[in-house]
Image (tube, rainbow, N blue to C red):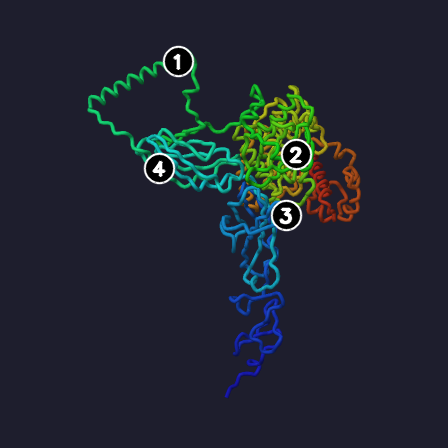
């Protein structure tokens, strides 16, 4: 009788297992597991490694993932967007999802509490498959902390604390919440009186309420609106015995809230009139005759006495929707306060007056042309304090200085956009005249970037640029031309939100070292200004686009000075001859190409800000286009900055390194085999790093020098020269 060999039924050795008895061979334990006894049916996981219930014994043991990386946030009012990258270590599993925890923190002591149920998460708060999330319905001017943790199928088995990334944000101003309670106070034949309560979250000072009303079932045919300053309004001009539908919403300087739920009110019945047909005909004829006489009188008055404003309906008070078409007042257009005969009237028309007692100045943070710039807090009635920046007018001013000081406030007061600095108001009725704006914790963009060279991802930098472009699109749509767009005039808050600021070009440039006189007088910032604006003082949205291209270069170069140490005259001549700034180190090709598009000589060929915003949005959504950077970029007939790089005296690599004051790296280049300038000019950023040059500033200086040498040779020998 045949018998199976004994080894078929032998027990498995240490480090091997067999999931069930039988004639199958023993299997080696999967990674991160071990069998420490003979005849094991399963290999136990190593310390801190696990299997979930659905993993077969043949599966390697896994562990929880590390924390997500590159967590960034963007803030738009009371809505934030979080983006992050997957963890570097997924724990060996593919079922990684993400949870987001939100906590609201008070201003004073870091006391935090859960955000509560009113917050809306899109697509969801827990078990996210994607690496992005939008959080809405947050409170205005409030601190929040968000934890983003990565989890997988074995995270629940681990006793160790989960790994997460955190980000702290502060929400901006926001529109008020919905008006909830609205009711009828009384009705008449032709009017209805309504009263309501202030929104639970005004998010600022309520400027006015808007009442929308229409006959029931006729909203698509006709509706009207009425504005009111208080929580009570009388709506007149209604029809007797007619059911109307009413809604109310509130407006602050940040915009309008949502309309309330509808409330239906029926007007009172009119008095019944009983006349025969002939009497009605006579009444109609009499009314028509009277109307003709009235029209004749009005026409006569208009011809001989001028047109009285008393006969005009206020576009601000009512808006009508007839025959499927809505009739609105003209779209908002920027009004230049300098066109006012009395510039102080512009301040009264546009800016909100703040009582000096509501402002608490805490410290001086800088100085301006007219006085000091301070940090302080503004107390909003019925609400908590908010941080603000305060520009003060120094003692001993004359009336002209005061008007010039307040003119910027009357400009800012007309703007309302998340990427434009927000004016809280002015103080003109106290001894100290002040302009009060929102507080931007990180100061000016150029200084902020220089102090954090190389600290941000390319997505973070593009997000900053997108915010600036969005603010400029808003200003351009209003018809406002900035004329001094530069990184020094962009402010950055704690959430890395960039906001366009500094709307006082005419006075600020007088002491600007980057400004130069033109033939027509005045000063302009040469390094940021379009050629047509320098030559003809022709400023437009297109010249702002040119300036935006320079801002892009500043951001990607971490606040480096455009055109380095070139003189203003050399900049003008070089740009006129076709020279354009090369791409900063590590700049993706797509972004440098957008800069070059902004620097088109023909202003009609430059992209509009709306297109720039669209392009940046696409790059953010398709980040693979931001991974490509070009070392050899497009140059056209450059002029060299002899003050920075003097190549005429450079015959060797050592001479060149001495000319850029980096002679300490001579041995690095010699050991790397770079013995001629021709070999140096073939180098890219990776070659520079391989030489052991670790300082980012020195890497950038070497690469910039190589790019300029290349451009010089292309200019000298022709564009077909091959390096």
Q: CA distance from mark 1 to mark 4?
A: 40 Å
Q: In this rendering, is residue 345 above or below 438? A: above
Tell me, for residue 301, which label it has, or none: 1
Which residue is depicted at the point 33% across and 34% down? Answer: 267
**Which label sits on residue 265?**
4
Q: Residue at x 69, y 37 (%)?
A: 363
- Mark 1, Cα crowd under 10 Å, few <14 / some 14-19 / many 20+, is few
Q: Position of residue 537 (x, y in %)?
A: 61, 23
Asked whether disc 3 touches disc 1, contact meaning CB atoms under 8 Å apart, the reply is no
Q: Which of the two discs, 2 and 1, sits closer to the camera? A: 1
Q: Find residue 109 and name its label.
A: 3
State which tag comes first along the sequence, 3 or 2: 3
Residue farthest toward the front in the current orientation of the protein: 186
Left or right, 656 with respect to 455, comes to: right
Element type at mark 2: helix
The C terminus - image quarter: top right
């Amino acid at each position: 009788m045949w018998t199976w060999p004994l080894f078929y039924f032998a027990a498995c050795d240490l480090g091997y297992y067999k999931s069930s008895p039988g004639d199958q061979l023993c299997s080696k334990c999967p990674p991160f597991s071990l069998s420490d006894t003979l005849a094991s049916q399963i290999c136990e996981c190593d310390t801190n490694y696990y299997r979930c219930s659905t993993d077969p014994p043949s599966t390697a043991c896994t562990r929880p993932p590390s924390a997500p990386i590159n967590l960034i946030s963007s803030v738009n009012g009371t809505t934030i967007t979080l983006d992050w990258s997957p963890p570097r270590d997924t724990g060996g599993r593919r079922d990684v999802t993400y949870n987001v925890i939100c906590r609201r923190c008070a201003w004073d002591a870091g006391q935090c509490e859960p955000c509560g149920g009113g917050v809306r998460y899109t697509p969801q708060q827990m078990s996210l498959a994607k690496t992005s999330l939008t959080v809405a319905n947050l409170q205005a001017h409030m601190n929040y902390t968000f934890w983003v943790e990565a989890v997988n199928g074995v995270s629940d088995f681990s006793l160790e604390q989960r790994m997460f990334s955190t980000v702290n944000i502060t929400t901006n101003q926001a529109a008020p919440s919905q008006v909830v309670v609205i009711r009828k106070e009384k009705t008449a034949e032709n009017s209805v009186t309504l009263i309501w309560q202030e929104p639970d979250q005004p998010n600022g000072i309520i400027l006015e309420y808007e009442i929308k009303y229409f006959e029931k079932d006729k909203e698509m045919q006709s509706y009207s609106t009425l504005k009111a300053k208080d929580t009570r309004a009388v709506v007149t001009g209604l029809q007797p015995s007619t059911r109307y539908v009413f809604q109310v919403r509130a407006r602050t300087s940040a915009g309008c809230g949502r309309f309330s739920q509808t409330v239906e009110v029926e007007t009172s019945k009119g008095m019944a009139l009983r006349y025969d047909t002939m009497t009605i005909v006579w009444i109609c004829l009499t009314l028509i005759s009277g109307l003709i006489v009235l029209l004749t009188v009005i026409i006569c008055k208009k011809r001989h006495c001028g047109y009285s404003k008393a006969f005009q309906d206020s576009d601000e008070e009512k808006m009508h929707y007839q025959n499927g078409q809505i009739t609105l007042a003209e779209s908002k257009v920027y009004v230049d306060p300098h066109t006012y005969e009395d510039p102080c009237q512009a301040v009264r028309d546009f800016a909100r007056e703040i009582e000096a007692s509501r402002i608490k100045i805490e410290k001086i943070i800088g100085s301006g042309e007219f006085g000091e710039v301070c940090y302080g807090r503004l107390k909003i009635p019925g609400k908590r304090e908010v941080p603000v920046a305060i520009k003060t007018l120094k003692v001993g001013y004359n009336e002209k200085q005061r008007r010039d000081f307040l003119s910027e406030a009357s400009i800012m007061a007309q703007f309302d956009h998340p990427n434009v600095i927000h004016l809280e108001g002015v103080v003109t009725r106290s001894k100290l005249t002040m302009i009060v704006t929102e507080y931007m914790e990180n100061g000016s963009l150029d200084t902020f970037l220089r102090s954090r060279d190389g600290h941000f991802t390319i997505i973070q930098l593009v997000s900053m640029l997108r915010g600036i472009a969005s603010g400029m699109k808003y200003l351009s749509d209003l018809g406002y031309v900035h004329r001094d767009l530069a990184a020094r005039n962009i402010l950055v808050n704690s959430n890395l939100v960039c906001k366009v600021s500094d709307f006082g070009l005419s006075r600020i440039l007088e002491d600007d070292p980057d400004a130069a006189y033109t033939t027509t007088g005045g000063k302009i910032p040469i390094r940021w200004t379009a050629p047509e604006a320098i030559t003809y003082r022709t400023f437009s949205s297109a010249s702002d686009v040119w300036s935006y291209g320079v801002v892009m270069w500043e951001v990607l170069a971490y606040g480096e000075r455009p055109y380095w140490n070139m003189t203003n005259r050399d900049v003008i001549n070089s740009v006129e001859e076709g020279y354009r700034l090369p791409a900063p180190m590590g700049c993706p090709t797509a972004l440098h190409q957008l800069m070059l598009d902004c620097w088109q000589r023909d202003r009609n060929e430059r992209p509009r800000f709306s297109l720039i915003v669209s392009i940046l949005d696409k790059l953010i959504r398709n980040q693979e286009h931001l991974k490509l950077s070009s070392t050899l970029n497009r140059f056209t007939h450059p002029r060299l900055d002899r003050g920075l790089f003097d190549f005429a005296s450079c015959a060797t690599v050592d001479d060149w390194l001495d000319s850029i004051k980096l002679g300490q790296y001579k041995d690095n280049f010699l050991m790397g085999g770079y013995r001629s300038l021709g070999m140096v000019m073939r180098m890219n950023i990776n070659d520079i790093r391989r030489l052991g040059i670790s300082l980012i500033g020195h890497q950038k200086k070497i690469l910039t020098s190589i790019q300029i040498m290349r451009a010089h040779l292309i200019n000298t020998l022709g564009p077909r020269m091959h390096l």
